[in-house]
Image (tube, rainbow, N blue to C red):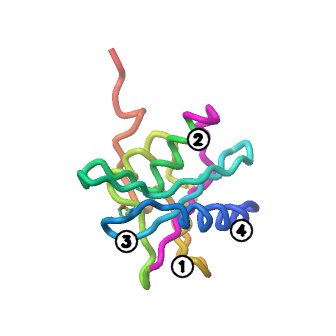
């Protein structure tokens, strides 16, 4: 079942992709997080001359959800890139997603015109190290 806000979120992610700062890789990525509240938060990759300082679209969206809106309850994540194969979140982003997503959280991979794949966080990262993995002292 597709999320009722999927189309709206796809447009938010595509719009964010246009704002990507990717002078080094030239690979623009947009993301949108649909929160349980119904709010849709945009993200894009923001690269850095040090390369290692680069942050992916998915993480900028998740951090904006927390930092700007104080919301952490994620309903779905959209990733938009331009590639023949769907672009899945990198391992670092999956680790950040493990903090706020569950196994059945939908992850929608799309390009600028169509959805390429609908998957879930659990399919992309079946055994996450997450907030339930240890008891803080
Ligand atoms: N990138 C993302 O923003 N999200 C992904 O899912 C894959 C990779 C960015 C990081 C970097 O700016 C560029 O794409 C090339 O790796």
Rounded to the nearest whole Å, what is the CA distance between mark 2 and mark 1? 25 Å
Q: Residue 68 colored magenta?
A: yes
Residue lying furthest bottom: 84
How far, Cα to Cα, is label 3 from label 2?
A: 25 Å
Which is more foreground, mark 3 or mark 2?
Answer: 3
Residue placed under numbered mark 1 in the picture: 116
Label 2 element class: helix
Mark 2 vs 1, N-terminal side: 2
Percent x, y for residue 130? 39, 38
Would you say 28 lies left or right of 34 here?
left
**In percent of the image, x 36 and y 56: which residue is there?**
47
| Residue carrying label 3 | 26
Q: Secondary structure at mark 4?
A: helix
- Is label 4 or label 3 in front? 3
Label 1 element class: strand
Seen from this angle, which residue lies furthest top? 137
Between 45 and 101, the residue placed more toward the observer is 45
In front of the other: 103 or 67: 67
Q: Earlier in the sequence, mark 3 or mark 1?
A: 3
At which x and y percent is residue 32? 59, 57
Residue at x-position 44% and y-position 68%: 28
């Amino acid at each position: 079942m597709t999320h009722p806000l999927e189309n709206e979120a796809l447009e938010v992610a595509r719009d964010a992709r246009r704002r990507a700062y990717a002078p080094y890789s030239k690979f623009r990525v947009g993301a949108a997080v649909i929160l349980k509240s119904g709010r849709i938060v945009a993200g894009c990759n923001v690269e850095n001359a040090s390369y290692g300082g680069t942050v992916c679209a998915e993480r900028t969206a998740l951090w904006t959800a927390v930092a700007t809106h104080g919301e952490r309850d994620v309903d779905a994540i959209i990733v938009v890139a331009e590639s023949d194969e769907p672009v899945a979140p990198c391992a670092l982003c999956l680790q950040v997603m493990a903090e706020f997503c569950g196994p059945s959280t939908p992850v929608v991979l799309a390009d600028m015109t169509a959805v390429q794949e609908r998957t879930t966080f659990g399919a992309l990262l079946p055994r996450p190290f997450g907030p339930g993995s240890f008891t803080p002292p």
